[in-house]
């Protein structure tokens, strides 16, 4: 959903948006990025600033169910839309299980990219695409999320665990 130009306006513009199932009306500067608004105005710090040009995926949120680089999306352009951040996952039992699979399979190391990885995976779950997707399709879908620590194998295992419905076994250490 990345846009190249901010909407023309003088001063802050009102934006009505649903964030994590809560309707919000915000005043945002026309050139404010969604990432900054989420973090600074709403205190939702799960999406991380990393590249700030929309290529690493650390800032991924869902806008109308689709993974979106919040560092490269003007906040004014989410007016009337639905935004979900990693903070929303714990309230959904299915998505909480996804988080648990990430923990059980060591699908993170430093954790900086984890929220973006989880949001891309959550999009697959919420859309119903994860169940039917091949391993190659999942890898391709997750390409928008970079991990400098190399946790990709753990992420793939976590998605397999989640897809198969295997409960996380705390006695089984992550590899």
Image: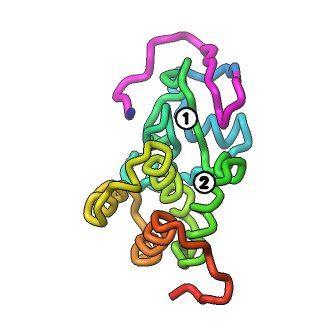
- Residue 164, position in %: x, y? 47, 68
- Give the magenta part as a residue range: 2-24
Query: Which label sits on residue 34?
Result: 1
Q: Secondary structure at mark 2?
A: helix
Is 122 or 115 nearer to us in this picture?
A: 122
Q: Does residue 5 belong to the magenta stretch?
A: yes
Of marks 2 and 1, the one in the foreground: 2
Q: Does residue 132 belong to the magenta stretch?
A: no
Residue, x 56% and y 65% (percent of image)? Answer: 112
- Residue 31, position in %: x, y? 50, 26
Residue, x 52% and y 73% (percent of image)? Answer: 107
Q: Is the image coloured rainbow, by chain, by secondary structure, or in one colour?
A: rainbow
Q: Which residue is mark 2?
A: 95
Q: Is residue 18 left or right of residue 58?
A: right
Residue 160 sits in which quadrant? bottom left
- Residue 93, position in %: x, y? 67, 53
Instruction: Estimate how packed mark 1 is, as few (under 14), some (14 to 19) or many (20 or more) residues with alpha carbons within 10 Å.
Output: many
Image height of 63 relative to 49, above or below: above
Image height of 135 relative to 35, above or below: below
Q: Check contact, mark 2 vs mark 1: CB within 8 A.
A: no
Q: Earlier in the sequence, mark 2 or mark 1?
A: 1
Quadrant placement of the N terminus = top left
Is 112 or 156 nearer to us in this picture?
A: 156
Q: Secondary structure at mark 1?
A: helix
Q: Is residue 163 left or right of residue 90?
A: left
Mark 2–mark 1 distance (CA, rounded to whole Å): 23 Å
Image height of 55 relative to 162, above or below: above
């Amino acid at each position: 959903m990345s846009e190249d130009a901010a909407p023309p306006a003088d001063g802050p513009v009102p934006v009505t948006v649903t964030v994590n199932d809560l309707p919000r009306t915000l005043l945002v500067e026309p050139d404010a990025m969604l990432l900054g608004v989420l973090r600074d105005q709403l205190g939702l710090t799960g999406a991380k600033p990393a590249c700030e040009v929309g290529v690493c995926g650390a800032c991924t949120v869902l806008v109308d169910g689709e993974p979106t680089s919040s560092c490269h999306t003007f906040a004014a352009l989410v007016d009337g839309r639905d935004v979900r951040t990693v903070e929303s996952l714990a309230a959904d039992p299915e998505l909480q299980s996804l988080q648990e699979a990430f923990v059980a399979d060591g699908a993170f190391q430093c954790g900086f990219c984890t929220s973006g990885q989880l949001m891309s995976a959550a999009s697959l779950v919420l859309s119903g695409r994860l169940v039917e997707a091949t391993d190659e399709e999942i890898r391709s879908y997750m390409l928008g999320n970079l991990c400098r620590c190399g946790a990709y194998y753990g992420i793939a295992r976590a998605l397999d665990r989640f897809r198969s419905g295997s409960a996380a076994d705390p006695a089984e250490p992550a590899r």
